[in-house]
Image (cartoon, helix red, strand yellow):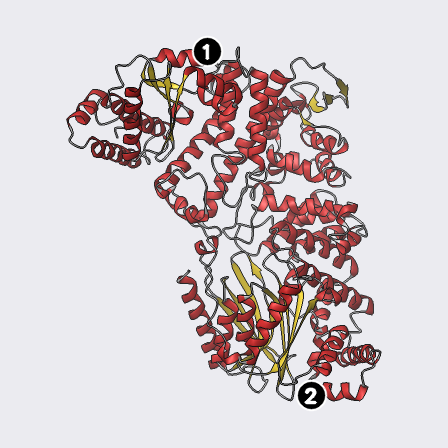
Amino acid sequence: MQLSPALTQQQLLDALQESAQPGQYARQYLEQGQERLNQAFEIADITDLVHARSQLVDQVMVGAWALFGLAQRDDVALVAVGGYGRGELHPCSDVDLLVLLADTPEQSVCDCLERFVAFLWDIGLEIGHAVRTLDECVDLARDDITVATNIMEARTLAGEDRLREQLEVRTGPEHMWDSAAFFAAKWEEQVTRHKRFNDTEYNLEPDLKNAPGGLRDIQMIAWVAKRHFNADSLEALVGAGFLTKEEYAVLRKCLDYLWEVRWQLHVLTGRSENRLLFDHQRQLADRLGHEDSSANLAVEHFMKGFYRVALAMSVLNEMLLQLFDEVILRCDDPEKVRPLNRRFQVRNDYLEITSDDVFEKSPSALLETFVLMAQNPDLKGIRASTVRALIYNRRQIDEAFRNNPVNTGLFMQLLRSPHALFSQLRRMKRYGILGKYLPEFGGIIGMMQYDLFHIYTVDAHTLLVIKNMRRLRYEDLRDEFPLASEVFYRLPKPELLYAAGLYHDIAKGRGGDHSELGAVDAIDFCQRHGLSAWDGKLVAWLVKSHLMMSVTAQRKDISDPDVVYEFARKVGDLVHLDYLYVLTVADINATNPTLWNSWRASLLRQLYTETKRALRRGLNNPVEKQDWIDETRDVAMRLLTGQDHDAAEIETLWANIGDEYFLRETPRDIAWHTEALLDRDDPNDPLVLIRESSQSVLAGGSQIFIYTPDTRNLFSATVNALDSLGLTIMDARIITSADGFSLDTYIVLDEHGTPIGEDWARIEQIRKTLTETLKYPERFASTVSRRMPRRNKHFDVPTQVLISNDIVNDRTAVDIHTLDRPGLLAHIGRIFMRFELLVQNARIATLGERAEDVFFITDLDGEPVSDPALCLELQEALTRELDDKNNGKQ
């Protein structure tokens, strides 16, 4: 298929001059030319397409320049700069132009230029333009590195090329921004740019131009090469000895891939877009030929490929910039070399091999590199030449290498290192060593999960888990993670924890239960690395059970001694509990920064504390519920009588409240509720109490206690009011007394994931809103209709409803997984109300775009829902109505 323009330059100029509407003609010419290029995408080389787009725009530019009478002048030139100057344009790329003047222009020239620029906008080109004299350009370039960089890539489209040549000379390294100054400024510019993207290639919605590993990193290398070596292409760096042929091939392949993605992104969005937003990722995956597999979505395959390319580009950029640093900035620095052993030495605070053939002669040195880095935390890094040798020689890592006791010993030595474990594992991953040594880890590099819950790729998450574990050693973390820090220091072998962290998600993306499959891999790892049978079983159990503690804490009623006993039975002993608790804390914190909050921390802390107590009491001696109830009543009574409340009056109030209240509430909270109920002025008004739950076992949220006559729609009215107040419900406990009153406790967080605090105006607003709502619950407003967050709209989360009966507690559990959205709980409450069902308890969890909520319900007589037909009807209604709401996303 022809990529060159349909007309010659002269034919296009003639057509523009003859047309009654040259602007419309030029617009159509561009559109038809672009459509021809888009159709060629499947068969043409992307480099040819990018250059062909530039040539198409060149034609129109030159034609328009002549159309407005500027072609014959020798005192003005039309110059392409930036990406356009390189001859690289994507379908909607900005077209950067410099109108270069020999001197201040005449008014007639200004008039022509104004019409020329207006014409370009009218035909649909997104232009960035500047009109400057030669002297003005020189002055600006001296002060602004970006201007100087743009001038380096300039090419003349029309007019006198001598103006551009003069500009090139006057802004060259002999006059301003010499190689050292230019490199230092561009490096600082890159560091600042990378910080905007959290210094990671693995953002959920990556920017393929500006983020680490993006197109700008390639351009950075090219700019420095051109400034210092006068290299007109990246390939010229091969001849200069800064790139090997293999590295250039990788760089070229990565560049082509990023260009292909960017081309399709522009075609899809119709604008100059560089961000791979959720809005576009699925469609791009389809356009680029990816398909769903049994274990992964097409979009996950696509993003895995993207992240791997970005990582490869980032490593090449890092290595080349260090080489440039040695040649450009530090060429005159004195050499300081000290030996470490026969294979390694330190040169100017960087680790390097003593000869080029070290890794060939001693393959084990591939792992020794990172052990030495961990043992010498004062080192700044690994020298670029050694990084290159590591990458080249990683091909020696085969099955024999992996089973060599010397190598397994080195890896365990690294896991036991007191310093920089995370940093060295991260280096090993970046240089391709970790994925070769542990092929199962290689399989998860770049793997993403298409949701808002897991905001990191699996490999990045895994290493963050280990980083979080290591951070627990630091004193400054004791305030943030007091219990986890204390427990960590009790672990007899922390390396077992790190091994479990390394393998807990290793089997994701294979299909099947990743915990089960990962446990098998973990056993193999432990056996290969010489761990004892007991140690291996512990690591495998941790991998297999790594979700058990968070699921129990967040989805079950851990105030129920039976729940605690069952969890303790599965854990077995205090050693397993300690390891599992630290792994769980590290895992949650590495999944999503918004996931860890004071409420989840308190749930895990409570489960750990109660389980530890159960284990010490002995699994053959479980606590009796009646003993628990009696102890709670006794402690609460002592608290109240100590405040001069009459015991008989208290017993009268408690007589109508069932045992479940004393099972599920703490003595301190019961005393708080009781005192307020006894002292209130009007017994007919709803009672609303609010305080920080840090004063109770349930630290980490704000407690809202409600005492009001029970009605069928009470739950719906309450959660609707809380939602309208911008509060997130973490837990709900609904108890109905024998005399028809509801005693409800809600644990809430504000929109920032923190307790309400001592904001008394806010507390009064909440109290007043709830009081008014509860006076007339049947009148509560329609469910909240705030807009759904943009990101959530692009996820298809089919509603799943599982209904089962809790025989022990005589209630029905309704487990709902659906797309999170404003007003969800109120809508679910309305459905329960329609079926004449009462909510007795609820555990609320929002995981990214998913809501995973468990409701414990009964019928109006307080009995579980035993009719199978009714259960099926309820399940179908919840599924249908919530899916209808999801499909009509606001």
582 vs 692, nearest the viewer: 692
Q: Residues within 10 Å of mark 1 (few under 14, many from 20)?
A: few
The amino acid beneath tag 2 is: Asn
544 vs 610, nearest the viewer: 610
Closest to the camera, between mark 1 and mark 2, is 1
* Residue 70: percent from left, percent from top: 27, 19
Q: Quadrant for residue 415, please give it.
A: top right
Which residue is drawn at the image coordinates 69% and 43% (left, top)? 528
251 to 620, vertically: above or below: above
294 to 260, vertically: above or below: below
* Residue 865: percent from left, percent from top: 54, 81
Which residue is drawn at the image coordinates 69% and 22% (left, top)? 353
State the SS at label 1. Answer: helix
The residue that mark 1 highlights is 169
Q: Residues within 10 Å of mark 2 (few under 14, many from 20)?
A: some
The residue that mark 2 highlights is 656
Which residue is drawn at the image coordinates 65% and 51% (left, top)? 589
State the SS at label 2. Answer: loop
The amino acid beneath tag 1 is: Val
106 to 855, vertically: above or below: above
User: Which quadrant, please, contains the C terminus?
Assistant: bottom left
Residue 591: mark in rendering: none
Residue 505 falls left or right of residue 147? right
Instruction: State the separation of the CA atoms marked 1 and 2.
Output: 93 Å
Whether residue 30 is visible here, answered yes or no, is yes
Whether residue 244 is visible here, answered yes or no, is no
